[in-house]
Amino acid sequence: MAQRRIIIKDKTFEVAIPEATILEAVANVARSIKKDYAERNPYFLIVLNGAFVFASDVIRLVDYPCSVGFTKLKSYVGTNTDGNVTELLAVPEDVKGRNVIILEDIVDRGYTMQYLLHRLKEAGAASSVIGALSLKPDHLMVPGLPVRYTGMTLPEAFIVGYGLDYDGQGRTLRDIYAIVED
Ligand code: 5GP
Ligand code: MG
């Protein structure tokens, strides 16, 4: 495991979930997806930027034909979310008629995924479910959100690492770190 405590900009973080635990959780997600979508040629829709590390690990464990596409959504500034979602890279048109598995880093309040599911319906996807690295269950504000696959549940704290950032930093950390409040 890497250093227990690190400083990014003005904040202190400490290891919350070590790499080995993350990779075990990710392998479980991939195994379930692989079983459920055999013969269905799934379409993995990766939500940039935060999900890119998680997604690259998942999709390489699903070793049969599938498609991969990307969208980029922004709903966060610093450590606060305001519920507004902006589409920075549009939902790809070739999701039409496909069985889509959204790969997302964190489902927090759920507004980002609610927005994306609505857009996938508009774009004519045949079905859409969510595969999330993590869920903050106490924060979820959208009832009935189809979070079909979840790697782990998280504490309340803001986290970085394994693709997730704090103001653009920390994405390359192998462990997941949680913020230490002063
Ligand atoms: P929601 O719309 O579900 O409230 O927000 C989800 C988005 O907020 C996720 O896509 C994720 O990028 C971001 N997010 C939520 N919690 C955290 C966190 O603890 N750390 C980081 N880096 N991003 C977070
Ligand atoms: Mg995100």
Image (cartoon, helix red, strand yellow):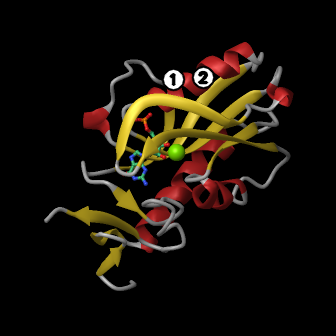
| Residue 99 position within the rendered picture, expressed as x and y whole percent measured from the top left | 74, 28
Q: How many marks?
A: 2
The three-letter code of the residue at mark 2 reads Leu
The three-letter code of the residue at mark 1 reads Gln
Identify residue for label 1.
114
| Residue 181 position within the rendered picture, expressed as x and y whole percent measured from the top left | 17, 62
Left or right: 68 in relation to 24? right
Mark 2 crowd level (few <14, some 14–19, many ≥20, 10 Å Cα): many
Label 2 sits on a secondary structure element that is helix
| Residue 26 position within the rendered picture, expressed as x and y whole percent measured from the top left | 53, 57
Mark 1 crowd level (few <14, some 14–19, many ≥20, 10 Å Cα): some
Check residue 117 in the rendering and tell me which mark sits there, or answer none. 2
Q: Disc 1, ligand 1: is the CB inside 8 Å?
A: yes
State the image quarter where residue 116 is shown.
top right
Residue at 42%, 60% (x, y): give it: 166
Real-space CA distance between mark 1 and mark 2, rounded to the nearest whole angstrom: 5 Å
Q: State the residue in front, 126 or 160.
A: 160
Name the residue furthest left: 182
Left or right: 100 in relation to 93? left
Label 1 sits on a secondary structure element that is helix
Left or right: 114 in relation to 182? right
Residue at 86%, 29% (x, y): give it: 94
Above or below, 3 relative to 130: below
| Residue 31 position within the rendered picture, expressed as x and y whole percent measured from the top left | 60, 51
Q: Are marks 1 and 2 in contact (CB under 8 Å)?
A: yes
